[in-house]
Amino acid sequence: MSSAEATLASIVEAAGAHVPRLLGHVEERLMMLATGHGPILAEHAGDTIAAGGKRLRPLLVLLAAGPAAAGRPQLVAAAAAVELIHSATLVHDDVLDGASLRRGVPTVWAQGGRGLAVATGDLLFSRAFSELTAAGSLASVQSLSRATSALAEGELLQRQDAWNAAVPVERYLLRCELKTARLFEAACEIGALAAQAPDEEVAALGAFGRAVGLAFQLLDDVIDVAGQASLTGKHRGTDLLDGTVTLPLILARERDPEIAALDLRTISDPAQAEQLCEQIEATGALGEAQARALAIVAEAKAELATLPLEDGQRQALTLVADSVADRRA
């Protein structure tokens, strides 16, 4: 069992027996939704879902709902909808980035071209909202709609900022919030709404999810510079090669005049990216970026202390926050 699998097992065990059962139902629902619309799209949408991933976002839906909502049919639909949105954005991101591999397997774009990949992502998006609408919660649909709009806005900001190493920290953090944190926030809000939690609890769990998502993205960007290829499945400095400016580079520019003067467009192959990663690491920027992420995780855990949660629910959500802080890939 890998470290990530062991962590997930600990979270699920803490949450209670209902969670693995519901996760199984979510997985079945995802495949049914992805493959029920014709053989061509079904093949690629199904492959996208089958490729797996951490399933962290649907897990947050279930954990935010708690055991009291375990028997409500809309809970599985809500969790599946959130994961479908996440999968759709990955398919579209691969088109924009020209990525040939995702989780070690060929992307839809690499297999079928741009048109098929765009259609596959669109299908996943449409199925997500159809599923959530059928569950009958207008507030949940609104929450997921806000998150999806934020994803698009964040992607536009990232495209505008490409190759611009002078991006300020505040704009970078906004981009992370839009592209990543808002969907984590929606997952927790939707789970709480499925449990018919009071408005203040929905908002507090949403704030927890947003903080966890922001820390997740910050650490993801640290891993891009410092991660081992054997764990991450990709070379160091992938972001540098496609012109994506992240916090480690922003902080390193403040510390090293040579990095500050660098034109990112001159980084054109993995060997150059690897060398720049080593320069960034030598400045101590990675430690500062990681410290910022850990402070955000601490804020997320403090948010939980204000909520009237069951012990297993609180423990499981705390473990999710800790797992984000400890991630290596």
Image (cartoon, grey):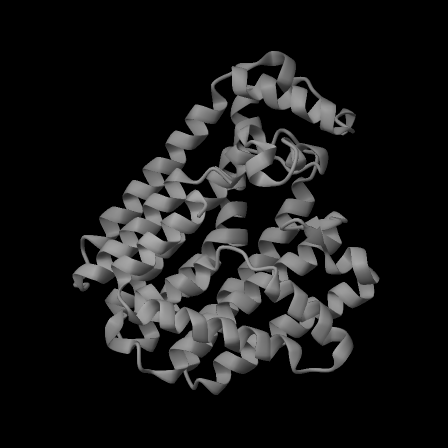
Say whether residue 171 is visible.
Answer: yes
Say whether residue 204 is visible.
Answer: no
User: Seen in the image, is 284 located left or right of residue 33?
Assistant: left
**Height in image: 40 above or below 234?**
below
**Height in image: 197 above or below 299?**
below
Residue sitting at x 57%, y 14%: 256
Residue 61 in picture, x, y percent from top left: 38, 66
- Residue 162: quarter of image: top right
Residue 146 in picture, x, y percent from top left: 49, 66
Residue 153 in picture, x, y percent from top left: 59, 56
Residue sitting at x 46%, y 78%: 77
**Height in image: 154 above or below 172?**
below
Q: Residue furthest front?
A: 1
**Height in image: 140 above or below 50?**
below
Residue sitting at x 59%, y 35%: 230
User: Seen in the image, is 112 located left or right of residue 86?
Assistant: right
